[in-house]
């Protein structure tokens, strides 16, 4: 191989390396070559949810926005609790966890109480909850957590509630439950 050919191939290779390398600055201001893709524009993990679900002042607040998931150390996002959506999500397919807190509306929830609460229990251990407040021991397996706790609150109404107010909550809820039972019984008697 002639000297000119070797020189031409070497020059071509050097030119190709310089063109393909990206020049970046490190924190000291020195220029370094980098072949790694830049990750500055990572996608917002909530972006697909936000396309249809409105995240406004009234809808998504609270501690979940400011905490890390204890299972993976990453910030909590929609997928942390609701799971990943499928292509058929808009058609009502049972793919994303839907929490059903209104136990008096007469609707059958898409997910059982146990399925709903298992999502919460992934981070909130039932044993610790029972130690803090006896109501968790009585209700945690029979009622969805969302029946008492607002899912995306600015302030959770259950936190810091006075003991007298707790008793009022018990009376109010059990009063509604009793009235609903009586109403169903009256309807059954009328149909006879």
Image (cartoon, rainbow, N blue to C red):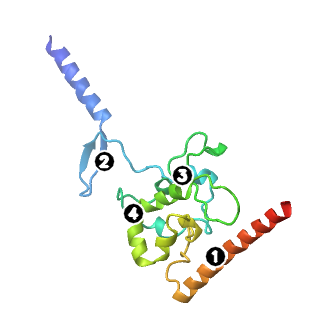
Residue under pointer 3? 47
Q: Sequence-wise, which precedes: disc 2 or disc 1?
A: 2
Residue under pointer 1? 174
Residue under pointer 2? 24
Residue 101 percent coordinates (x, y) = 61, 64
Residue under pointer 4? 68
Rendered position, 56 above or below 31: below
Q: Residue at x 84, y 60 (%)?
A: 192
Q: Residue at x 23, y 52 (%)?
A: 30
Rendered position, 24 above or below 174: above
As drawn, the residue found furthest toward the front would be 192
For disc 3, the neighbor class at 10 Å (few under 14, some 14 to 19, many from 20) is few
How many numbered marks, from 0 up? 4
Q: Sequence-wise, which precedes: disc 1 or disc 3?
A: 3
Element type at mark 1:
helix
Rendered position, 112 above or below 94: below
Q: Residue 186's image quarter?
A: bottom right
Element type at mark 4:
loop
Q: Sequence-wise, which precedes: disc 1 or disc 4?
A: 4
User: In 3D space, how far apart are the residues under numbered discs 2 and 3 (Cα atoms)?
Assistant: 29 Å
């Amino acid at each position: 191989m002639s000297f000119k050919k070797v020189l031409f191939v070497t020059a071509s290779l050097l030119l190709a390396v310089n063109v393909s390398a990206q020049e970046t600055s490190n924190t000291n201001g020195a220029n370094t070559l980098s072949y790694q893709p830049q990750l500055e524009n990572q996608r917002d993990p909530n972006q697909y949810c936000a396309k249809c679900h409105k995240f406004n002042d009234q809808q998504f607040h609270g501690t979940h926005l400011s905490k890390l998931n204890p299972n993976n150390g990453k910030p909590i996002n929609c997928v942390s609790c609701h799971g990943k959506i499928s292509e058929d999500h808009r058609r009502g397919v049972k793919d994303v966890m839907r929490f059903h807190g209104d136990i008096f509306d007469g609707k059958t929830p898409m997910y059982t109480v146990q399925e709903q609460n298992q999502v919460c229990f992934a981070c909130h251990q039932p044993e610790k909850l029972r130690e803090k407040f006896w109501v968790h021991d009585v209700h945690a397996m029979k009622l969805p957590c969302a029946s008492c706790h607002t899912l995306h609150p600015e302030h959770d109404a259950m936190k810091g509630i006075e003991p007298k107010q707790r008793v009022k909550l018990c009376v109010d809820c059990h009063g509604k439950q009793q009235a609903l039972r009586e109403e169903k019984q009256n309807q059954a008697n009328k149909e006879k």
